[in-house]
Image (spheres, grey):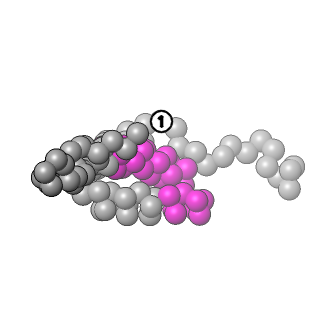
Amino acid sequence: MRSRLRGQVPNVRPPGKANDRKRRLSESESNDIAELGFEEALAELEAIVRRLEEGAGRLEDAIVAYERGIALQRHCDAKLQEAQSRVERIVVGRNDAVLAEPVSFD
């Protein structure tokens, strides 16, 4: 088998218009991430992780999926930070007054 592979060039497309077009598509697709809710973004991220773990498909597709996954992960982190800053704890203060105060998750 080794002798059969010697001298052969792998089937890899050189940089060019096809790869540039695919890159532009991934950038335009990432623009829609801001419109996704947390649950939608997380579901898509989980699907990407499953596909990448399977290892099937072309390298270029995996790279594009990985880049989108990173953008989705950052979006989910931002959504969690936003939710965390909005969470308040209800406490009973002096004279049985009910108060709300920010919760610290640190």
The answer to which quarter of the image holds residue 47 is bottom left
Q: Is residue 21 visible?
A: no
The residue segment tinted magenta is 49-78
- Of residue 24 and residue 30, the one placed in the foreground of this image is 30
Q: Residue at x 82, y 52 (%)?
A: 4
Q: Quadrant of residue 38?
A: bottom left
In the image, residue 71 above or below residue 96: above
On the image, the x and y values in percent for residue 80 come to 32, 49
Task: State whether the magenta stretch is mostly helix, strand or loop.
Answer: helix
Q: Residue at x 86, y 50 (%)?
A: 2
Left or right, 81 with respect to 101, comes to: right
Looking at the figure, which quarter contains the C terminus?
top left
Nearest the eye: 49 or 99: 99
Horizontally, residue 88 falls left or right of residue 12, namely left
Residue in the foreground of this view, choosing between 20 and 54 = 54
- Three-letter code for the amino acid on which mark 1 is drawn: Pro
74 falls in the magenta region: yes
**Which one is nearer the viewer's eye here, 11 or 43?**
43
Q: Position of residue 46 (x, y in %)?
A: 45, 61
Position of the N terminus by quadrant = bottom right
Q: Is residue 41 visible?
A: yes
Which residue is the site of mark 1? 15
